[in-house]
Image (cartoon, rainbow, N blue to C red):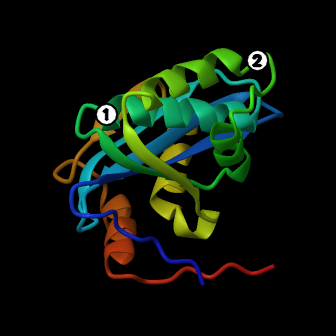
Amino acid sequence: MVIWRAPQLHQIKLNTDGSFDPGTLIAGGGGLIRDHLGRLMLAFHSSFQAVSSFHAELLALEMGLRHARQISLQIWIELDAAAVVTTITSGGLGSWQVQHTLTRIRNMLSDLQYSISHIHREGNRPADHLAALGAAALGSHIVDEGTASHHLLALIRMDQLGYPSFRFS
């Protein structure tokens, strides 16, 4: 069972996800920022150029951090890419193709009070949905609670209500 958890009272939560198809080299990413009640503050998705799924995850995180730090300096970052979480927490450099992106992310993180954690894809469904939209879109898109799709709002509401997702191995 995988359950999304809301952040603490004076914190926001940033969930991101990246998408990359090695056959077509199509990449995108997306994410959302929610308050301590799980309410949507901002969601985003974008297409971009990436060299790998790891790179797409980093680009989605970078995009999310740009938006999140305009809202709060206390951020809980959560994503379904365990390798990204490990690389950031360990201070790893990554491959030469992603080092500039990692440096930009670390520079943004240096100004924040943050925690970063991994959640299985099943608990990151709204961000996964936005990443798929990003891979299919041209350019960047930002929505809020008033302009988000019914599908995205339904995924967010299920998280707010504590509905579990199930992971099968």
Q: Earlier in the sequence, mark 2 or mark 1?
A: 1
The three-letter amino acid code for the residue at tag 1 is Arg
Say which residue appears at 79% left-offset and 16% top-offset.
96
**Closer-to-camera residue (109/45):** 109
The image quarter containing residue 34 is: bottom left
Q: Does 150 sit above or below residue 57? A: below
Percent across and percent down for residue 62 are 50, 30
The image quarter containing residue 72 is: top left
Label 2 Cα neighbours within 10 Å, binned few <14 / some 14-19 / many ≥20: few
Percent across and percent down for residue 6 are 35, 67
Percent across and percent down for residue 119 are 59, 63
- Residue pushed farthest left? 146
Say which residue appears at 75% left-offset and 26% top-offset.
93
Q: Which residue is mark 2?
A: 97
Element class at badge 1: loop
Say which residue appears at 48% left-offset and 53% top-offset.
127
Q: Which mark is residue 159?
A: none
Q: Which residue is mark 1?
A: 69
Q: Does 106 sit above or below residue 144? A: above
